[in-house]
Amino acid sequence: MAVNSIDTASGATLFAAVDLGATSGRVITGRVGPGRLELTEAHRFANTPVRLPDGLRWDVLALYQGMLDGLRAAGRSGPVASIGIDTWAVDYGLLDADGALLGLPFHYRDGRNLRASQRLPAGCDVRELYAVSGLQHLPFNTVYQLLAHRETAQWEAARTLLLMPDLLVHWLTGSVGAEITNASTTGLFDARGGDWSDALIGRLGLERSLFPPLREPGDPAGTLLPHVAEYTGLPGGTPVTAVASHDTASAVAAVPATDADFAYISCGTWSLAGLELDAPVLSEESRAANFTNERGVDGTVRYLRNIMGMWLLEECRRVWDRSGTPLGLTGLLAEAAASEPFAAVIDPDDASFLAPGDMPGRIDAYLLRTGQAAPRTPGGYVRCVLESLALAHRRTLRRAAELAGRDPVRIHLVGGGSRNELLCQWTADASGLPVTAGPAEATALGNILLQARAHGLVGDLAGLRRLVAGTQELRHYEPRGDRGAWERAEARLGRSPCHLDEAAAPAPEGGQV
């Protein structure tokens, strides 16, 4: 059944984006028409992991219920042309032969992943893994999670693996598939060939039948099941469209760049900093520098590194809130701006900062072992975090440009971090490049626009980006201040013994650390 979704009064078409992040989920509606792109938040809900006796798990049932409630709210805005789902990467659910979920999906911050990443099956070489998948070595990559999961009783019953957005699409429509931008983050994807790597899957002792057929952004992913349509109030013929289901891929699609020579930072819980390329960079130099090659829209490559992002600040605020002294972000940023510059700097990717916990205490411990004094005020911690993130942005983008043979002239900083004026200005100061900040809702915009493109309302990727640039609020920051101060801070930094990239990195010649 076709769904009449054009608002005849406005000439715009309504789409619904389900956007799930590490701490919250939203359903956003977007109206797209000639020169028009407007977002409205229909529903927001918490994403609260649950620690069970066997590890840290995602409460995917609560997320699904929140999504359904959000779609019901979205339907009250008008006829919905399509639904798209994006989430974080790497995590997955296993289905049995009846299509039932085998337990709540594990959280990528669960400790089992670090243990599994320290050992690869005999005959597997990390150089070979990178030469095929081009994936940055991180202890929570799907490939290591699967090696850990293989040791459980659930594994024998598993028949299908669905990454998080694909699992939710399956529950909405009954269809089974794997969207390509998220599949490319598993470590089991052929970066050159653009498909699952049968060779890697077999070498790791995994079953090829677990991995469903791939979908491209814009492909149809089914229509709502009758009971879903009944609950949400949406028509049974409402289509679900595959978008760039890795949230970073949707965010990069919505970068408002007007030329090709740009770098991007998608800044939220993580900072994903890199370049958009036409082909992967699979050199040994790139592997040693721990850059990842993930699939973007229209066959592009997101050449980037993960940097621990606003997670550091949010964990500090959570600890301060629990102590009975809640501190508003506005006041903290004002106090940070007035604090001493470069009093303390950290490596945001130190492994000690990965898990939830006492982040101010962990920063203190890092500073102690690197011979630095701990901040005396919350504003001092915030300044330490934001200056350190700006330095991490600087060195990551410089190294990406060197390895890819590119010379970016501007940084586009999108996502929630684009609202943080200190971080944006300090990123410009540290890098020496102008920064365009916004849109903050880049992920939802990319999700919406890829649905609109599938419906013939938007042209190519460049046209999509022009629409973002012409309709969304952007802010511009020029480099200023003493560049030498940033150079001296970088020289002080060094690398801690527990850097995230190296915490579980296999030895160069094989699978054992």
Image: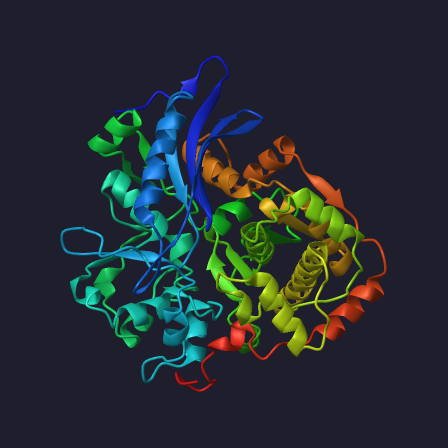
Q: Is residue 391 above or below residue 216?
A: below
- Kindly give the residue lying farthest to the left in the view shown: 98
Residue 82 found in image quarter: top left
Going by the image, does 269 lie left or right of 375? left
Going by the image, does 390 lie left or right of 278? right
- Counting from the top left corner in percent of width and height, residue 173 is at 25, 39
**Residue nearest the viewer, comparing 152 with 325:** 325
Going by the image, does 152 lie left or right of 9? left
Q: Is residue 510 above or below residue 445?
A: below
- Kindly give the residue lying farthest to the top in the view shown: 9
- Kindly give the residue lying farthest to the front in the view shown: 324
Q: Is residue 463 above or below residue 280?
A: above
Going by the image, does 335 lie left or right of 368? right
Give the colour scheme of this rendering: rainbow
Q: Is residue 237 visible?
A: no
Q: Classify the position of the N terminus by image quarter.
A: top left
Q: Is residue 346 above or below residue 77?
A: below
Q: Is residue 285 visible?
A: yes
- Counting from the top left corner in percent of width and height, residue 221 is at 31, 41
- Counting from the top left corner in percent of width and height, residue 349 is at 58, 67
- The residue that appears at 70% across and 63% down in the rendered structure is 391
**Residue nearest the viewer, comparing 508 with 390:** 390
**Residue nearest the viewer, comparing 376 with 404:** 376
- Counting from the top left corner in percent of width and height, residue 443 is at 51, 43
Give the number of marks.
0
